Every structure is written in C-alpha cells, then in structure tokens.
Image (cartoon, rainbow, N blue to C red):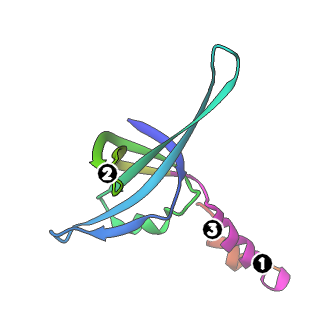
Amino acid sequence: MNITGRLTRDAEVRTTSQDKQVVNFSVAINDSYKNKSGERIEQTTYFDCSYWITSKVAKLLTKGTLVELSGRISTRAWTGNDGEPRAGLNFHTSQIKLHGGSRKAETVQASAQTKNNKVTAQETADDLPF
C-alpha cells in the first residue's frame, strides 16, 4: 500500500533491546469531499510510521516534508493515562520517496543564500539533485 502525506514532527531514531535501530515518525494525510448537502468536508488521518532498513534516513525526515511511503498498515489499541480507550494506525514502511523539502530545509537554504547577499557556484553545486 502507498500513502502520501506530510511529516508532523522530525523523525526519531530508537534502539531496541536487540540493538536494532528503528526510525519513528508521524505522517498526516489530508483528504476532502463534499457531503450530500454540498458542504466540503476536510478530513485528516494520522499514521505513526516505522522504518527499519537504515537509520540514516532520519536526517531527511523533518517536520513538513512531503513523503510517499510504501508498506503495510496495522492497527493498535491501548488505554490512555486517563483510562479512556484509544486506537491508532501504524504504517510499517518499506520504501520512502521524498517529494518536497520541509520548512526547516527551506529556512536553512534561505539563510545560506542571504549570507553576504550572494551565493557562489560552489555553494549551490551541492544543492543540485543530479
């Protein structure tokens, strides 16, 4: 299954008791539709995601980044600290495609360009995708 959405927070790397590293992050998917009355209804679905292949990808997964994920979905249920039942969707990610920069990356790029009000060719060569 594929999902496309934006990260709601920066990715975190955690180490399991078996010394395996997992990258955890959250993705929001926005959807809208018109109901029978013709009103536009906005709906957001949140997925808690995990990626086990390499932890190096965590540096790229920052809040606001648009990603396309391939993997499988599972559900989980628990009782919250307030005693109320809760449920969530987990997405076990096997492939990640980045489709857009995060606001943080755009801020870093903008600050690099405003340094001395000029950008040299050497500074921009590292930013090229090819």
Q: Secondary structure at mark 2?
A: loop
Determine the image quadrant of residue 32.
top right
Q: Quadrant of the C terminus?
A: bottom right
The kind of residue on which mark 1 rests is: Val
Q: Nearer the viewer, mark 1 or mark 3?
A: 3
- Can you tell which mark lies on residue 104? 3
Against 118, residue 70 (above or below) is above
Determine the image quadrant of residue 42.
top right
> Dot 2: within a 10 Å radius of its alpha carbon, few (fewer than 14), some, or many (20 or more) residues?
few
Helix, strand or loop: magenta stretch: helix
Which residue is disc 1 drawn over?
Answer: 119
Closer to us: 130 or 88: 88
- The magenta-colored residue range is 98-117
* Residue 71 % position (x, y): 34, 42
Give the alpha-carbon distance from disc 1 to disc 2, as whole Å. 56 Å
| Residue furthest out toward the left | 18
Which residue is disc 2 drawn over?
Answer: 83
Determine the image quadrant of residue 64.
bottom right
The residue shown at (17%, 70%) is 17
| Residue furthest out toward the right | 117
Closer to us: 82 or 47: 82
* Residue 110 % position (x, y): 74, 71
The residue shown at (47%, 45%) is 46
The kind of residue on which mark 2 rests is: Gly
Give the alpha-carbon distance from disc 1 to disc 3, as whole Å. 19 Å
Closer to us: 4 or 78: 78
Q: Does residue 106 show up magenta in the picture?
A: yes
